[in-house]
Image: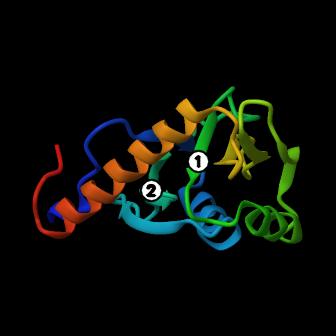
Amino acid sequence: MPDSDLPPTGVLAVLPSADVEAALDFYTETLGFQELFRLPGPDGELVDARVMFAGGQVMLNRNPEMAPAAGGGVYLWFRLFDDDIDELYERYVAADVDVVEEIGDRFWGDRSFTITDHAGFHLAFNRALKNNKAPENNKALENNKAREDNNAVETAAGHDPE
């Protein structure tokens, strides 16, 4: 298996699904996630697929027994740095995605909204407010962004950032 087909190091969220192809279509076509990987099983049906959004990766895994009827309490956060969160929200509303928390500014210094995917998993999208009054939050965001940028440079250069 080529290195690019291997899961990333660190924590990888895995969402069980009865139909990985339908899940992959929803995440890529409806939500605009980038497809990274797909693995068909011996029967030709997809067993696994991996998608990415805002630097975060999610594995969609065929596991009908574990696939929840309504999300199973799973809640994923996608932290945006350079993306326009209002534009993303409007795009999802126009695509008729189920919004469970309207977009808004939160007391902790984020602008966020929450949707559910086709299987009921909760997906929260958030971005720091430009005028965040908590300077320690802004410094932490700057450090995280710098670390992400450094990891991207190291990876592009063929080095393991870890």
In the figure, is residue 5 to the left or right of 100?
Answer: left
Label of residue 78 in the image = 1
The answer to which of 50 and 152 lies nearer the viewer is 152
Q: Say whether disc 1 or disc 2 marks the residue closer to the N-terminus.
A: 2
Q: Position of residue 33 (x, y in %)?
A: 56, 65
The answer to which of 143 and 92 lies nearer the viewer is 143
Q: Under tag 2, what secondary structure? A: loop
> With respect to residue 38, does 143 lie above or below?
above
Amino acid residing under circle 1 = Phe
In the figure, is residue 88 to the left or right of 105?
Answer: left
Q: Is residue 65 visible?
A: no
> Crowdedness of circle 1 by 10 Å Cα count: few (<14), some, many (20+)?
some
Q: Position of residue 131 (x, y in %)?
A: 71, 48
Amino acid residing under circle 2 = Gly
Q: Position of residue 128 (x, y in %)?
A: 65, 46
Identity of the residue drawn at 39% across and 43% down: 143
Q: Name the residue carrying label 2.
A: 55
Identity of the residue drawn at 82% across and 43% down: 105
Identity of the residue drawn at 69% across and 26% down: 73
In which image quadrant can residue 87 be found?
bottom right
Q: Is residue 121 visible?
A: yes
Which of the image's four quarters has the C terminus? top left
The answer to which of 24 and 19 lies nearer the viewer is 24
The answer to which of 109 and 49 lies nearer the viewer is 109
Which of the image's four quarters has the N terminus? bottom left
Label of residue 86 in the image = none
CA distance for labels 1 and 2: 8 Å
In the figure, is residue 17 to the left or right of 44?
Answer: right
Q: Under tag 1, what secondary structure? A: strand
